[in-house]
């Protein structure tokens, strides 16, 4: 890892992002066998990579077939994607869990303020059924950091969960209800709550429990079921150590150490900072794996850096935590 990398990425000014990205590229080209081979296979000369748009992005599918590691280390943990029955899951060896924790804590607080101000409730039944979920790890740590004793995970205990939310509402306690989409829909149909102090955040995913729906349809059902004006969303994946958040209408914003770009569907080496295409992500917290990820998500990036996720590309496998398709 480059010297003082954590300090550089979390404390750096926005104008340093391109410089840090180029530093990460050179470091990972030298020290990541998989990435090095991929860059060479493309015929890219690292000496002439002098802008973010010229950096090669590693296809996310490499996390299914290779151990993507920068340097030689024993992973503190290996996060795994949920995938679908019979599919090959992605795995992400993590050298330093403290780096991941610093990323998601600082990212959450950037958009929502101190974790200690919140009651954190996780409605993630499908993720709790397996080990090594990066999402479960994140929510569990946020629950630990929360000062509210009612913070915790709930499976299908909808009556108990409803009572907890009603009590929090009565106390005007800021509450985050973060859940997989199908579980939130199930709960919304049964609860008939009116939430004024609770943020409802979906992480995507039907996992075969319900028919796929467009985001707007899902959000309308959740807004009606919970009596809320907006549904928030989290955009993350096993292959990343950072998350972007939407506070409504499917428009996401990333923390300063993460950037979303788009590549041309026909020519993946053509990368743009704005416009429509297939999403590429720079995540500087991925310094021990690969910071430059070419996803299978279609999207649109706006001039202010915010972005939309428009669904999965044709031919890409559906992920357990995938967002709804259009």
Image (cartoon, grey):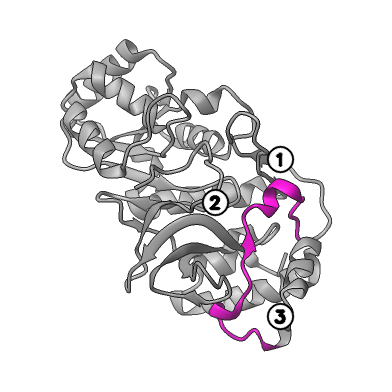
Name the side, left or right, on which 158 lies relative to 29.
left
From mark 1 to mark 3, how far is it between C-alphas? 32 Å
Element type at marker 1?
strand
Residue 161, quarter of picture: top left
For image coordinates 25% across by 43% down, the residue present is 216
Residue 44, numbered label: 3
Element type at marker 3?
loop
Tell me which label, 1 or 3, sits earlier in the chain: 3
Q: What's drawn in magenta, residue-wise?
A: 48-70
Residue 77, numbered label: 1
Which of the two discs, 3 and 2, sits closer to the camera? 3
Nearest the eye: 40 or 132: 40
30 versus 71 height, above or below: below
Residue placed under numbered mark 2 in the picture: 102
Nearest the eye: 209 or 74: 209
Residue 251, quarter of picture: bottom left
From mark 1 to mark 2, how far is it between C-alphas? 16 Å
For image coordinates 66% across by 71% down, the residue present is 24
* For the residues bearing labels 3 and 2, Cβ distance under 8 angstroms: no
For image coordinates 75% across by 56% down, the residue present is 69
| Residue 57 falls inside the magenta stretch | yes
């Amino acid at each position: 890892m480059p010297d003082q990398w954590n300090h550089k990425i979390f404390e750096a000014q926005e104008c340093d992002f391109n410089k840090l990205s180029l530093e990460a590229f050179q470091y990972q080209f030298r020290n990541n066998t998989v990435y090095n081979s991929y860059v060479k296979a493309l015929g890219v000369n690292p000496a002439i990579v002098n802008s973010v748009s010229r950096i090669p992005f590693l296809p996310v599918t490499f996390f299914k077939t290779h151990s993507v590691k920068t340097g030689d280390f024993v992973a503190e943990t290996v996060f795994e994607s949920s995938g679908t029955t019979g599919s090959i899951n992605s795995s992400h060896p993590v050298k330093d869990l403290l780096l991941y924790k610093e990323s998601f804590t600082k990212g959450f607080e950037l958009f929502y303020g101190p974790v200690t101000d919140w009651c954190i409730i996780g409605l993630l039944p499908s993720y709790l059924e397996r080990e090594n979920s990066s999402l479960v790890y994140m929510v569990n740590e946020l629950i630990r950091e929360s000062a509210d004793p009612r913070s915790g995970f709930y499976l299908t205990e909808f009556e108990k969960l409803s009572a907890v939310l009603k009590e929090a509402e009565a106390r005007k306690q800021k509450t985050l209800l973060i859940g997989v989409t199908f579980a939130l829909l199930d709960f919304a149909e049964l609860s008939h709550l009116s939430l004024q102090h609770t943020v409802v955040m979906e992480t995507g995913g039907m996992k075969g429990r319900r028919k796929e729906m467009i985001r707007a349809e899902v959000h309308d059902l959740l807004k009606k079921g919970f009596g809320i004006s907006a549904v928030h969303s989290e955009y993350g994946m096993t292959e990343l150590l950072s998350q972007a958040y939407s506070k409504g209408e499917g428009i996401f914003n990333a923390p300063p150490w993460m950037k979303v770009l788009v590549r041309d569907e026909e020519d993946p080496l053509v990368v743009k900072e704005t416009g429509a295409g297939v999403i590429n992500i720079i995540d500087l917290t991925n310094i021990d794996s690969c910071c430059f990820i070419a996803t299978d998500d279609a999207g649109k990036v706006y001039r202010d850096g915010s972005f939309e996720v428009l669904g999965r590309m044709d031919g890409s496998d559906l992920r357990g935590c995938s967002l709804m398709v259009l």
